[in-house]
Amino acid sequence: TRPPPFNGSASHTNVANNAKTNPSFNRWQKIAQQRKSLPIASVERRLVQEVRNNDTLIIVGETGSGKTTQIPQFLFNAGFCRDGKIVGVTQPRRVAAVTVAKRVAEESGVELGQRVGYSIRFDDMTSSSTRIKYMTDGLLLREALLDPYLSRYSVLIVDEAHERTVHTDVLLGLLKDVQNKRSASAYGCPNTENKQLNDGVLLDKGQGVWSGAMKQCQSRRFSTLKLIIMSASLDARVFSDYFGGARAVHVQGRQFPVDILYTLHPQPDYLDATLITIFQIHLEEGPGDVLVFLTGQEEIESVERLIQERLRQLPESNRNMWTVSIFSSQPSEKQMRVFAPTPPGFRKVILATNIAETSVTIPGIKYVVDPGFVKARSYDAAKGMESLIVIPTSKAQALQRSGRAGREGPGKCFRLYPESEFEKLEDSTKPEIKRCNLSNVVLQLMALGVDDVIGFDFIEKPPRAAVVKSLEQLFLLGALTEDCKLSDPLGHQMARFPLDPIYSKALIQASQFNCLEEMLITVAMLSVESIFYAPREKLEEARTAMKCFSSAEGDHITLINVFRAADEFSEKRKSGQSKEKDDKVLKKWCKENFINSRSLRHARDIHRQIQGHVEQMGLHIASCKDDIVQFRRCLAASFFLNAALKQPEGSYRALASGQVVQIHPSSVLFRTKPECIIFNELVQTNHKYIRNITRIDYLWLAELAPQYYSMQR
Ligand code: ADP
Ligand code: MG
């Protein structure tokens, strides 16, 4: 590795001089030192040898030992990227892909997007010279649609496999298959007469994943695909077994003792307990940064505000606390701030989702505050309803979290529940594939040529009922034909969108209803968390501000109003000077209108990108202008699976599932309570709340979705 190009200094400059005068050189030296001191540095040669010797390798290692940042660089240096080949690393989380790529680019002294890059949904930072590529597992699955042999990759690393996200699980199945096929072709490319191709492993029982793509193989040879599965959990067996007894190696980490503290009694309000604990640490404990685990953006932002409020009440000398946050929907410059060194005399408090559990390692942490909760997907196959719920962590998660306090020295972890509760936790988290809606995955697998999804070689089979339910949903959305094949063109079109099938369908549908412009905005706005924010102390002001955008028809049109108002404002106030200045002006506008500027920016970004997809597909983008009925009809036609009828006592009954649900207080329809509605989100806390709701006419359902609401219903 080379030091990064010095700021304008000539390459012959004396190195000793540079060290004194050039901050970027000093920084690089520091980074080089940090890298050398990582536990993994001492086993570089052995690891590379293991990869050479084994086509599939399982690497288990404690969090922070350097797996994610170092191993791809080892492989690059060992020549695995010769002939333009790429080492790809998948991450379950967008944030990890981005922050790690930035770090590795810096460590290698290259510009991000050149040799080292990342690619996540709606954000591609790679170029033709990229050789180490970090990406989400979902993105690699999509790449397989275009390049079934993943031929550009010499090595694929599935990182954080212990998280067992649904994409990771599906990816493991696909990669196993790709690896087999590439190996087969490496030993002599099969031609069409080759019996083995048709009868043997390659197209077994008509389940050949790459049946279409095999034709290309006649003229191509593929090198073997090296697979590395990396996991922070010590149990490598499940992966090793799945890959036919693949070799597993263990990378020793460094772990200092961590004191675990429990509360005496259960905490009725864990956010309040979190706040008290943060200040207790700040005022009573020695120096060291604090990592706090919260469940999502809303919680993080409200705790951040409460901290600021309390800080103002403290004497000047105690206000030396610096809060930063990290969660998925944040712009990436913000995310990188958690890695910035704490200013001298200050204490950094990092408010994070479980991103910081194993995916990213932040240096300097001595204290961990763990309320013991996590937001997780949950799926009721019988009802066909997926929801996000806040649930207790597993024991394994609690251990990972506390481990974060002992990376650089002894630390302390404050678990905000009694010790007796810990014993009751599940040992490990249930794989996501067992508790989520599978429509998306099933659609993608079918687009890849896997017709028999139930028979697919999953590391752990999803519940049969869930697969059947998603097949049924895809059929109702028109993506499948009666004999369970992908429909043409609708099913293929839907699979090409990087969106949930229900949203892909909504966009395609909207082009027929002449309201694609409105639907694009809707889908973009629904893809981000909480556009509005209402701080407790300014609740009334926030409500008044929201009224300017509110539509009596519902939240979808309200969201469109916000998006358009922001657009109009930006257009009017465009300075023509710099993007930063324009951003700042818009941010101020957001603040005045109680709109979450991060979320809005993210939504605008997503909008731009799905518009690109839609244009590429040649869909007709038009606006229904003032014909709001037309747009509402389109919403009904698109989201008919989520329709609900008012009950006499004011709650709602979801028509598809029969569940009784309540309108969330944040909805503009919370008070008016129309007779019939469609909704986009179900959140379960103490109540089953639905959010993002629009009023529709009950009769439209039978008219627009007769395949579902036939006369008998
Ligand atoms: P693992 O994958 O084994 O959990 P990583 O490779 O992610 O470990 O991290 C190795 C080390 O690199 C950690 O000590 C971490 O603190 C450091 N590191 C990772 N990303 C950054 C960053 N953006 N800034 C500073 N240090 C970082
Ligand atoms: Mg890692």
Image (cartoon, rainbow, N blue to C red):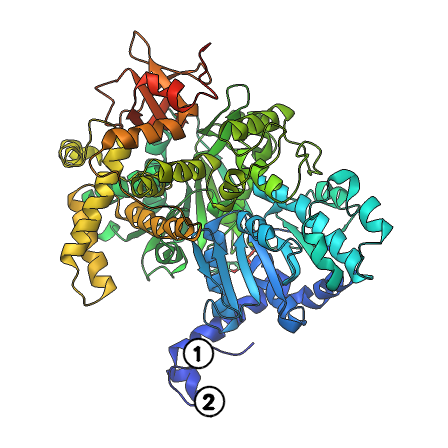
Residue 295 visible here: no
Is residue 39 or residue 454 the one in the foreground?
Answer: 454
- Label 2, on which residue? 11
Indicate which disc, 1 or 2, sits on the residue closer to the N terminus: 2
Image coordinates of residue 179 in percent, x first then y, are: 73, 53
Q: Quadrant of the C terminus?
A: top left
Q: Is mark 1 within 8 Å of ligand 1?
A: no
Q: Is residue 578 above or below residue 321?
A: below
Q: In which quadrant of the rendered view does residue 422 lie?
A: top right
Q: Is residue 224 above or below residue 208?
A: below
Looking at the picture, which amino acid does disc 2 mark? Ser
Neighbour class for label 2 at 10 Å: few (<14), some, many (≥20)?
few
Q: How many marks?
A: 2
Image coordinates of residue 270 in percent, x first then y, are: 38, 30
Q: Is residue 149 above or below residue 520?
A: below
Looking at the picture, which amino acid does disc 1 mark? Phe
Q: In which quadrant of the rendered view does residue 521 lie?
A: top left
Residue at x 39%, y 58% (from the top left corner): 336
Image coordinates of residue 344 in percent, x first then y, are: 33, 62
Neighbour class for label 1 at 10 Å: few (<14), some, many (≥20)?
some
Q: Secondary structure at mark 2?
A: loop
Cα separation between marks 1 and 2: 12 Å
Q: Quadrant of the N terminus?
A: bottom right
- Label 1, on which residue? 25
Q: Secondary structure at mark 1?
A: helix
